[in-house]
Amino acid sequence: MLDIGNIIIDKEIDARGSFCPGPLMELIRGMKALHVGGVLAVLSSDPGSSKDIPAWIQKAGHELIGVFPEQGYTRFVARKTH
Amino acid sequence: MPQRIVIVGGGVGGTIVANLVARALRPDEAMITLIDATGEHAYMPGWLYLPFNGSEGIDLTRPERGLLNKHVQLVTGEVQRIDVSAREVTVHASPGMAGMRGTGGAIEARYGYDYLVLATGARLAPEDLSGLSGSEDAWHHFYSLDGALRLGSALRVLNGGRIVVAIGGIPYRCPPAPLEFLFLLDEWLRKRGIRERTEIEYLSPLPRVFPIESVAEVATPLLEQRDIHYRVFFNTDEVDTERRVVRSLEGEAAEYDLLVMIPPHRGARIVEEAGLGDEQGWIATDRATLEVKGHEGIYALGDATDLPVSKSGSAAHFEAKVVAARLIAAVRGEEPDPQHATYDGEVMCFLETGHNAATQLVFNYENPPHPPRPSLFYHMEKMLFNRAYWHIVPQGLV
């Protein structure tokens, strides 16, 4: 487990440098395997993720906790709600 | 004493590694053993054409022995156990075989190794999607020889209706294959004169029809031109074969008359049992050296890894050269040449778009593909590759 501020991350997936199948796919795969209430983080260096990942989280009805820009990549943190 | 190199899996990756290493090292330097459950080498890309009777001239399987350098010992048997602390692999005769070929007919044998290569591939795991397991007669796929043949039989008696193509789990082998199938299906239905009474819908798990945006930009207008419907953000969560409906994680449903499902995939059982896989059985692999994380002297390649590249013969092909370069250097006690012994995520594959046209995808970890406009040229190149494969790829000549 990783602690960002007061958020406990249950699982973090490093999808940097991934085009195919890509960070969104890694996030969906991770969400499917996660328990309800769990928090998942995905690291992505793909600029398309800033649009795709929040869009999927909203469509699937989960909670986007935050988007954290880091050096050369972004960390997306989401909670599985159902 | 020669160093012992054991390779598990006789697919494209394992076979190329075996041949490259056998060509470079003398028998007194390395003893190379390849273990494969069937002893038959499958050309999986050929399965895509089978439902449409389009595989004439393409050999779908050949005996593995005939593809291997004579210095490689081929053992036909099932790996029962990989003991990483004892550095030993235990092999049993495959079901239905009296003994293991390549060992004088033994029932069980153990192979100690100095270097181990896991080219164990992916397996279909219908049990990972609710409603698929136990109802195999009620849905179709083209991810095995039998599956592709059965789908072909179903299509030949089809007289219209609603065909749904859906993704059962991520990741799956050959990401372009569902799109290629849709384009070939549309063409085939038009030739049969039943396209007008057949609706085709593709359920994409992504916000677009293909993971990579530049490829989706080429494929989407083609789907629209051919009246192939698609829905995005549809991650299949359940299949109800009684009601003929597919339901998604996002809360949507799609009804069908004929369902073509890309089955969920997992890593090999033996990998999971050896404690080398993640929760889906993929092996944690260093993205540059292809060494299994935390296990010196063990390499993984192809579909078996957890690398963020497509699960494809092409990735396995490029990775095999890297693994071979590292093994050759290690046996000789040399430092690996960083240029040849580093994987940069290189993949090169074709995407058939139907009506004798195709495009080509070339990419690596850092650079996405820029697919050219689909044309006859790339289709012919793919057709040529389908035939030339057996003579150049497993041998490691390209």
Image (tube, coloured by chain):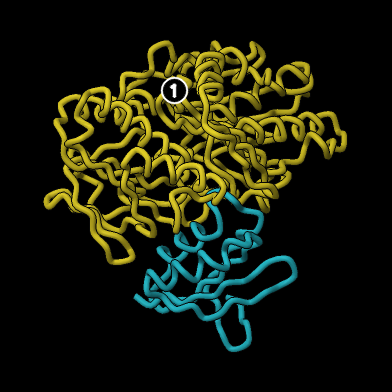
Residue that badge 1 annotates: B356
Left/right of residue B164 with respect to residue B349 in the rendered view? left
Q: Nearer the viewer, residue A14 or B134?
A: A14
Q: Is residue B15 above or below residue B271?
A: above
**Which quadrant of the rendered structure holds the C terminus of chain A?**
bottom left
Quarter of the rendering containing residue B53: top left
Q: Nearer the viewer, residue B342 or B77?
A: B342
Q: Secondary structure at mark 1?
A: loop
Q: Residues within 10 Å of mark 1 (few under 14, many from 20)?
A: some
Chain whose colour in the figure is yellow? B
Residue at figure coordinates x 12%, y 50% from the top left = B242
Q: Is residue B172 above or below residue B51?
A: below
Q: Position of residue B204 (x, y in %)?
A: 38, 52
**B181 horizontally vs B140: left or right:** right
In which quadrant of the rendered view does residue B385 lie?
top right
Residue appearing at x 59%, y 76% in the figure = A67
Instruction: Please name whichever residue, B237 or B327, is drawn nearer the observer in this view of the structure.
Output: B237
Determine the image quadrant of residue B329.
Answer: top right
Residue B362 spot, x, y in % from top left: 63, 37
Q: Residue at x 44, y 14 (%)?
A: B59
Residue farthest left in this picture: B242
